[in-house]
Each structure stands twice: as C-alpha cells, then as structure tokens.
C-alpha cells in the first residue's frame, strides 16, 4: 500500500509473510499419531426441525448425507466428504416467501454439529449453498445445498461422535423480473425437534486402536450440556463405567484425565487451520479485476445503552485496490502517498454480513437476544494518506461505509417477538466525519494507523496486511419493526439500542491478492479465498 504494485506491493507482502501477521483460531492443539484409517461409512439422516418463518413456527425436514471413515488413527483428521443438505420447506413457509414478492430462492445453510469424544466436546459448522430454485405455486420446496466442511481431529483414542444441533438458512429472494425482493434476504433459525431420531446423531468414528465399534451407539457423556469436562476433570459414571473412571489414575481405561480434552476442528480440507468463516471469493456477479483483493474482518461493537458489546463474527470484504499516488518533497527527502480503493461486503452475492446474534440484559435484568445483519447501502471507500522518508513510513487509513442495521429476529426472556421482515434502522449508522464536504451523507467510519521501517514487519493497520481499526458510531432510530396485526416494536428497539458514541473495533486479516499470476499460499487458499481469519479483540 506504500508504493506501486510493481515494487512496494511485493516488498510489503514478503514482509507480511516473514512477520506471520494473522493468528490462527483452532479449538485445540495437535495430537500424537497411531493406527491407520479403514473403510468408509455413509451418512443419510433425515431430521425434523422447528423453524421460525415470517408467519410463525413450522416444521422443516433437513436431510444430511455425507461419507466418513469408519476408523482413523489418533491425530488423523476426519474429513467429511460429499456433504449434502436437503432442506424441505413446508407449503406455509413457501407461501410466506411468495407474499414477499419472491419467485426464486437461494439458500446458504449452517448446520451446527456437536463433536464429542469421551467427556469433551467441540462444535463444527457445516456450511452449504444451493442453486437458485423457483418457488412452487403450491406444495413444499426442497433446496439442496453443498459445500466443504471442517475437518475434525480426535485428541485421544476412543469413539468420536457427531450430532446435529441448531440449523439456520439465509434465503436470498429474487422476483420474477430478476430483481431483489423486499427484503432481499430472510434468515430462518431452526432448533432440532424433540422427537428427532437418536437425538440428531449423524455418525461415530473409531479413533485409534481401541476406538471401539463405530456402529455402536456411544455412551452418554456426563458433565455440562456442552460436552465440556467437569471442574474436577474426572469423567462421571456411565453404563460402561459405573465407577466413573475411578481406576486410581484419574481417568478411564488407565488414561490420565488430561486426555479428556476437546477434539480439534480445522478448516475445510484440513490443510489450512483457520476459524470458521463464510465463503469469501469472487464470482460471476462480482468478478475479479486486475487489482482485486479479498479479506476477512471481525470485531466488537459496543452498545452503550445496554452496557455490553456485540461480537460480529468473521465476514468478507471484496476490495479493488487503487494505484498509489506519490508527491515528492522539493528536496526529495521523502514523499506523501495517497491511495483510493473501493470495496463491498459479500455474503452469498449480497452486500451484507452473515447474520449474527447478540444477547444483552435489557433494562439491566431481561435477557434479550437479537439476530442482526449489516447491509451495505452505498459505495464503500478506503482512503489512505501517508508520508515516507524511504526508511520510515506512516499511513492513516479511513474506511467509510453506509451500513444499515437490520434485525431479523428478537427474543425477550426466551419469548419470540415478531419483528416482521422490514425491521431496520431508519438510515445508515453514522460516525463523526472530519471532511463532510468531501464525504457527504451518512456512513460509518473506521480509522487505522500503520507504521513500517524498511526491512521490518509493519505494525498497526495497513490495507494489505490488515490490523485493527476503530471508530465511534451512532445507531439511528428503528423503523418497520413489528407486524400489521402485532405490536409496534420500533420504540422498544430505539429506546434499548439507538444512540451515539458506541465504540467499534474491527480486525482485518491479511488480504489475498486474487489477481496475481500465482496465488500466494501464505495469503490465499487454493480456491482464492483469504487464508487468514482474524481474531476479534476488544
């Protein structure tokens, strides 16, 4: 970012590689190796889910199919293959979408899979995308989603079990003329029905020599509902071990209790450990150009009125980098550098973040959970200004984006309040603008400052290597919240959330230069997505 593509770009990238700028997020460390893998088992499970559609709760069927190994070595990644999710929406739910003016729907699915081994557990997210499918005039609608899913690695010997948990789908809606419906997207959250067969069990894989028969139902783990170990670290009693592993050595089968730790969840393919993140790649709607970058961002946004912060999980930005412009000092002792770039949020061909949840104590005692989406309402610009003496370079970058906050669902003290399909802020989130004449209109502003000494890693924020950006934002009043025959919730949300001076801190990861003749394996996955997923910081 501090020089032309032909020179400084490559220098900055080599420094970024040497500095190992972005951190990896994994659920656990690697484990020792043991015996090899055996045959393959087929998964084909149909599960009932209770889903919240605009008209209310309906039952949807979710069929999950995949191929998994029957047995793996301890420490060998378990990679689900040929994963397909068929979601069948009932006729009443299809009618809801039709009422919004939709003629076709495309789904992005998220299935939470609980992974347990012994008393320890972790979660993996199986994501998929479907083709755009016409809504039937009557009857149910089935959407078929496919996609890569994370690998899972057991950290000790013993059976590893996978069970389906919560399920969500983001429906991108289009009208018959090809335009977007209003709203353009509908998020549907689903919970596994109480009568789901075998509590949503998908498969079991034997890990190591004594992993047991994967076809035999695993014993019920004791401890917390999340599958984490008890505070003592000692397994509780089960049918197989009524003494709860009290063999005098602190663990079952003579193993020490420290072996009772969570499985490790890695990125799809298991080749590049990274946190769960949505797809971030250029496509036919957003084709890559000669200066195209992509990157993940994540962070926190305070909500002053609720004395809390909302975590915005990793989301994708597609960036078109501008050419830097140099103005040399009269004595050629240095130069100023300016650069203007543009960008778009990206989620399933929509300029928005994936849905994210936040739970607060409204009025200091009532737990309130909101599912929200940030929608880009206009051009996003990235303007950098710096100075260099050709040894030390400092750069200030301002990201400006008009973002509307949309609320898709709301629960107060466990009770769902119907916010309708058009609940959003009246205008974009706003920040104090230092140059209002040059940058008119409502928009959020994030500022990042980076410094670099030639030959040393950069510190702070640079467009290419990422880093922290901060700002303050005003949340406008809400509108459209509630239904025609229900309670108007505009004032409740406005009173609870809207207001000024909410601190925001976002972390951008290392960019992937997708337009390079050859993708940099330290920056990009094989399919031109960002390799590095940043970790949110407060």
Image (spheres, helix red, strand yellow):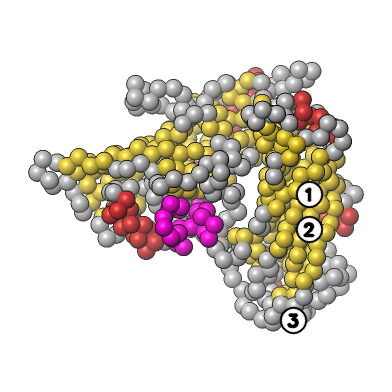
Where disc 3 sits, the SS reads loop
State how far apart marks 2 and 1 are (Cα).
9 Å
Q: Relative to 57, is 469 on the left or the right?
A: left
| In front: label 3 or label 1 | 1
Q: In the image, which residues are magenta?
A: 512-536
Return the disc, 2 or 1, that comes first in the chain's sequence: 2
State how far apart marks 3 and 1 are (Cα).
35 Å
**Residue 361 in view here:** no
* Residue where numbered disc 1 is placed: 86
- Residue ID at (61%, 63%): 269
Q: Position of residue 69 (x, y in %)?
A: 74, 71
Q: Label 1 crowding class (10 Å Cα cut-off): few <14, some 14-19, many 20+?
A: some
- Taking the magenta stretch, the answer to whether it contains residue 534 is yes
Q: Are marks 2 and 1 in contact (CB under 8 Å)?
A: yes
Q: Nearer the viewer, residue 256 or 74?
A: 74
Q: Which mark is residue 209?
A: 3
Q: Label 3 crowding class (10 Å Cα cut-off): few <14, some 14-19, many 20+?
A: some
Where disc 2 sits, the SS reads strand
State how far apart marks 2 and 3 are (Cα).
27 Å
In terms of image quadrants, where is residue 41? bottom right
């Amino acid at each position: 970012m501090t020089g032309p593509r032909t020179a400084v770009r490559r220098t900055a990238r080599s420094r970024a590689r040497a500095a190992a700028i972005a951190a990896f997020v994994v659920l656990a460390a690697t484990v020792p190796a043991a015996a090899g893998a055996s045959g393959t088992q087929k998964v084909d499970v149909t599960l009932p889910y209770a889903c919240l559609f605009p008209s209310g709760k309906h039952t949807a069927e979710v069929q999950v199919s995949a191929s998994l190994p029957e047995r793996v070595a301890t420490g060998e990644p378990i990679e689900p293959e040929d994963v397909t999710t068929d979601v069948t929406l009932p006729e009443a739910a299809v009618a809801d979408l039709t009422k919004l003016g939709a003629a076709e729907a495309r789904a992005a699915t998220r299935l939470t899979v609980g992974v347990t081994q012994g008393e320890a557990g972790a979660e993996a997210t199986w994501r998929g995308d479907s083709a755009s499918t016409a809504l039937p005039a009557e009857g149910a609608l089935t959407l078929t989603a496919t996609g890569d899913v994370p690998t899972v690695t057991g950290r000790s010997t013993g059976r590893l079990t996978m069970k389906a948990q919560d399920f969500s789908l983001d429906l991108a809606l289009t009208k018959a003329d090809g335009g977007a419906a209003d709203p353009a997207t509908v998020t549907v959250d689903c919970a596994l029905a109480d009568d789901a067969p075998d509590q949503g069990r998908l498969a079991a894989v034997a890990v190591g020599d004594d992993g047991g028969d994967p076809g035999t139902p695993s014993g019920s783990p004791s401890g917390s509902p999340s599958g984490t170990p008890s505070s003592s670290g000692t397994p509780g009693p089960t049918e197989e071990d009524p003494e709860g592993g009290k063999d005098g050595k602190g663990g079952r089968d003579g193993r020490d209790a420290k072996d009772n730790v969570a499985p490790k969840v890695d990125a799809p393919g298991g080749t590049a450990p990274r946190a769960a993140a949505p797809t971030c790649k250029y496509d036919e709607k957003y084709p890559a150009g000669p200066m195209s970058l992509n990157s993940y961002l994540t962070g926190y946004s305070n909500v002053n009125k609720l004395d809390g912060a909302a975590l915005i999980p990793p989301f994708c930005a597609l960036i078109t980098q501008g050419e830097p412009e140099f103005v040399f000092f009269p004595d050629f002792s240095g130069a100023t550098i300016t650069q203007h770039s543009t960008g778009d949020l990206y989620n399933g061909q929509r300029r928005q973040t994936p849905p994210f949840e936040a739970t607060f104590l409204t009025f200091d005692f009532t737990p309130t959970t909101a599912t929200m989406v940030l929608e880009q309402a206009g051009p996003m610009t990235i303007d950098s200004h710096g100075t260099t003496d050709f040894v030390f370079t400092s750069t200030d970058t301002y990201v400006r984006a008009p973002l509307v906050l949309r609320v898709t669902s709301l629960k107060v003290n466990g009770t769902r309040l119907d916010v309708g399909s058009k609940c959003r802020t009246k205008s974009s989130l706003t920040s104090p603008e230092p140059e209002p004449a040059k940058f008119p209109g409502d928009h959020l502003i994030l500022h990042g400052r980076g410094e670099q000494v030639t030959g040393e890693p950069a510190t702070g924020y640079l467009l290419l290597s990422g880093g922290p950006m901060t700002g303050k934002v005003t949340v406008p009043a809400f509108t459209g919240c509630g239904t025609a025959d229900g309670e108007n919730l505009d004032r409740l949300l406005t009173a609870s959330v809207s207001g000024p001076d909410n601190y925001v801190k976002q972390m951008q990861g290392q960019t992937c230069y997708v337009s390079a003749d050859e993708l940099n394996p330290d920056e990009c996955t094989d399919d031109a997505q960002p390799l590095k997923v940043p970790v949110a910081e407060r």
